[in-house]
Amino acid sequence: MPKILVLYYSRSGNTEKMAKVVAEGIKTVGDVEVELNYFVPVEELANFDAIVVGVPTYHHNMPIEIKKLFEEVAEKGIHLKGKVGGAFGSYGWSGEAPKYVLEIMKNRFEMKVIEPPLLAKYVPDQDKKNSCLDFGKRIAESLIDSG
């Protein structure tokens, strides 16, 4: 059974709200295991078939905690090649962070990324929550279809 991690960072709670709904969307597919978490030791990332990162944009960038996570993955040589990757997040002005996450997943770790990233300006409304459900479902289906 494919295992999917929804890992998120959130200060205001908006990206966390998105993460919870993305995880719900994944669960609708069935025959997948989903873990929703704020923190995971980098060594555990290798245990997942897909890694979906929820990251808000602060000052035109991703939070330092997410940068450090990726740096540690690289330093420790954690193998992510071929895993499915996805990114989403809330923003106030610019929304670059999820795009940066996908770029790192694709170019540095050679993951198969689901594009484009899912973005929500400020608090996700019902339409954006529906998009989160669809996004989660799409991530899970990509594993079922390829497996």
Image (cartoon, grey):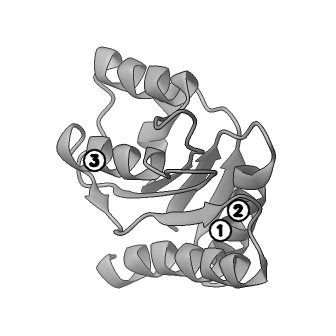
- Say which quarter of the image contains residue 144: bottom left
Closer to the chain start, of discs 3 and 1, is: 1
Q: Position of residue 79 (x, y in %)?
A: 29, 36
Q: Give the residue drawn at x 30%, y 78%.
A: 146
Viewed as shown, does residue 32 lie left or right of 70?
right
The residue beneath circle 3 is 103
Viewed as shown, does residue 97 lie left or right of 125?
left
Q: Position of residue 13 (x, y in %)?
A: 81, 47
Q: Amino acid at mark 2?
A: Met
The residue beneath circle 1 is 22
Q: Between residues 114 and 83, which one lies in front from this camera angle?
A: 114
Q: Amino acid at mark 1?
A: Val
The residue beneath circle 2 is 18
Q: Give the residue drawn at x 34%, y 17%.
A: 76
Q: How far apart, in angstroms, are the residues tagged by discs 3 and 1?
A: 20 Å
Q: Amino acid at mark 3?
A: Glu
